[in-house]
């Protein structure tokens, strides 16, 4: 049987992103159980219906990557109690049907959500907004467990490297295992 393909979408474009590092920690834990890839989408333009058809090359590329994934895992920061605009922009592009024949590519796709922030909320409010959006787009959301990691600065070394603590690390492991089961169950 082919390996499950998980596509991680990080809602931060910054190189040292904690959420990107969290995605890489999840990839490490997934190990050989799945192909786990991070989507690079920093080059897609702002949604503008004047340039929607034909879609820009960068948009075509991310659409193809999302289409060929069995599942999507969002790792999102919280910006002003919301998820970042770059992520909304990406999802807006992905939400549009490519042609009359092809259905919306996010619909039915299993999805998980995680996030880490320096504050006490651990991105929970941003995640709630993201759930609303991806549920509207009919993604198959794993609502439990979701992973919200607060107080990120107590879990970084002096180079900004993420070092998950004794609470966050097992929580991430639990979510990895739960999502593998969630996705695997839908592919049987
Ligand atoms: C515009 C903006 C708004 C922010 N708002 C929040 C917020 O509402 N809650 C929070 O916990 N952190 C907030 N932060 C801090 C981010 O959580 C922090 O910069 C985090 O490291 C960003 O995620 P990243 O490391 O993955 O890039 C905000 C940062 C920016 C740039």
Image (cartoon, helix red, strand yellow):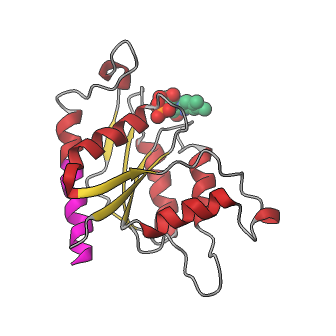
**Apparent side of residue 16 relative to residue 45 in the rendered image (left or right):** left
**Residue 121: percent from left, percent from top:** 40, 34
Is residue 117 highlighted in magenta? no
**What residue is at 60 percent from the left and 44 percent from the top?**
42
**Residue 104: percent from left, percent from top:** 55, 75
Residue at the top extreme?
Answer: 158
User: Which secondary structure class fits the magenta region best?
Assistant: helix
Q: Quadrant of the C terminus?
A: bottom left
**Apparent side of residue 98 relative to residue 21 in the rendered image (left or right):** right
Can residue 122 be spotted in the picture?
Answer: no
On screen, residue 121 above or below 63: above
Residue at the bottom extreme?
Answer: 101
**What residue is at 51 percent from the left and 44 percent from the top?**
11
The quarter holding residue 185 reads bottom left
In depth, the one of 93 and 24 nearer the eye is 24
Can residue 124 be spotted in the picture?
Answer: yes
In depth, the one of 146 and 60 nearer the eye is 60
**Residue 138: percent from left, percent from top:** 46, 72
**What residue is at 49 percent from the left and 38 percent from the top?**
78
The span picked out in magenta is 174-188
**Residue 139: percent from left, percent from top:** 43, 69
Q: How many marks?
A: 0
**What residue is at 63 percent from the left and 53 percent from the top?**
89
**Apparent side of residue 104 relative to residue 117 in the rendered image (left or right):** right
The quarter holding residue 149 reads top left
Is residue 175 highlighted in magenta? yes
């Amino acid at each position: 049987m082919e390996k499950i393909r998980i596509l991680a979408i990080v809602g931060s474009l910054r190189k040292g992103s904690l959420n990107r590092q969290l995605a890489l920690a999840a990839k490490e834990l997934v190990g050989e159980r799945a192909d786990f890839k991070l989507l690079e989408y920093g080059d897609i333009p702002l949604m503008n219906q004047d340039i929607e058809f034909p879609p820009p090359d960068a948009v075509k590329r991310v659409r193809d990557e999302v289409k060929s994934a069995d599942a999507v895992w969002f790792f999102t920061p919280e910006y002003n109690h919301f998820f970042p605009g770059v992520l909304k922009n990406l999802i807006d592009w992905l939400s549009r049907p490519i042609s009359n024949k092809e259905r919306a590519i996010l619909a039915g796709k299993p999805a998980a959500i995680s996030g880490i922030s320096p504050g006490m909320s651990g991105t929970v409010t941003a995640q709630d907004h993201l759930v609303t959006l991806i549920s509207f787009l009919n993604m198959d959301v794993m609502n439990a467990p979701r992973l919200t990691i607060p107080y990120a600065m107590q879990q970084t070394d002096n180079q900004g490297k993420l070092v998950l603590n004794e609470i966050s690390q097992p929580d991430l492991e639990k979510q990895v295992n739960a999502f593998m089961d969630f996705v695997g169950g839908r592919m049987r």
